[in-house]
Amino acid sequence: MPALPSSIMNPLWSQFEALLPERNVTHPWGCHKPRISDRIIFDKLIQVLILGAAYAKISDTTCSATTIRRRRDEWITAGIFNALEQLCLEAYDRIVGLDLENLVIDGCLVKAPCGGEAAGKSPVDRGKQGTKRSLMTDGKGIPVGCVIAGANRHDSPLLRPTLERLSRFGYLLPEQIKVHLDAGYDSRQTRGLLTELGCDWEISTKGEPLQAGVRWVVERTNSWHNRGFKKLAICTERKARVIEAMISLANSIIVLRRLIREAWVTHRWDSRPNRKP
């Protein structure tokens, strides 16, 4: 059974393939091994991301684990994963529309048993190594930015770099933005930052009963990350740029899946699924 249905995999690969740099490498003697197809490597990376399998476990006669990692690093250096995520967000905004007037931000702690650049002692897992994702979504739960840090980092210092990810939208940003936060951000420092950036806010008050509001959408997106992508739930990557690439790829899948689901009742296209995904 494929890791992703063809209704998602095919358009995702189509956009990814269009971003790949052209290669015109020939060997003068014609005796080199043929280059492994990019599609094979892409399919393997999707399996690694969703199934959480090690590269050595997912490799087979078609390609080795070393080839998967080497090609992955080439694509990261070329910025292809970030570009793919940006294309998916722009497509969603054109067809459905992003709700950037309301932003929801929250942190999520996951295990990082191998340690690495984005790992720290987890305060909720007996001091074991963990990674924190500071995730920002629009008012509907579409992921629009994410920052990673060690699990021992507090949410508040990550708020500024998380909000800075909005620069990717440029002129699309509305004049007034309202940021929704939980009680972990209830401080004068947070309010001062939001005032500096010209944002309104809705922050839960410490010591009072849970005030959910619209923050449930970011909790749902965190659940999509952890339940749908095992590589994000148990982060075994050690390099920060690899983790960020995996998050960008996961966000691309989430955004594309939501786009197909919401456009299914309003649009028609040749490869449209027979039933609502």
Image (tube, rainbow, N blue to C red):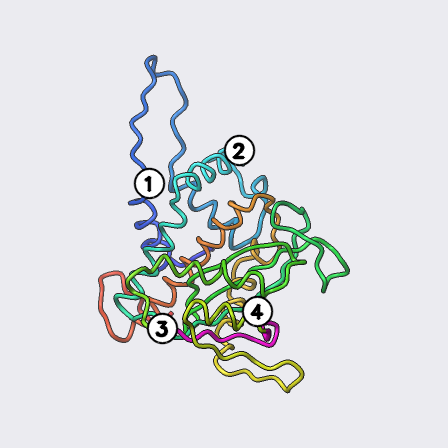
Separation of marks 3 and 4 at Cα, in angstroms: 26 Å
Where disc 2 sits, the SS reads helix
| Residue for badge 1 | 20
Q: Mark 3 is on which residue type?
A: Asp
Determine which quarter of the picture holds residue 123: bottom right
Name the front one of labels 2 and 3: 3
| Residue for badge 3 | 99
Left or right: 119 in relation to 191 = right
Where disc 3 sits, the SS reads loop
Q: Earlier in the sequence, mark 2 or mark 4?
A: 2
Question: Quick one: 5 or 175, which is closer to the camera?
Answer: 175
| Residue for badge 4 | 189
Left or right: 209 in relation to 176 = right
Residue 60 percent location from the top left of the image: 52, 37
Q: Which residues are magenta?
A: 177-187
Residue at horizontal 42 percent and vertical 76 percent from the top: 178
Q: Mark 4 is on which residue type?
A: Gln
Q: Residue furthest top?
A: 29
Q: Residue furthest right?
A: 126
Name the front one of labels 3 and 4: 4
Residue 46 makes an appearance in the image:
yes
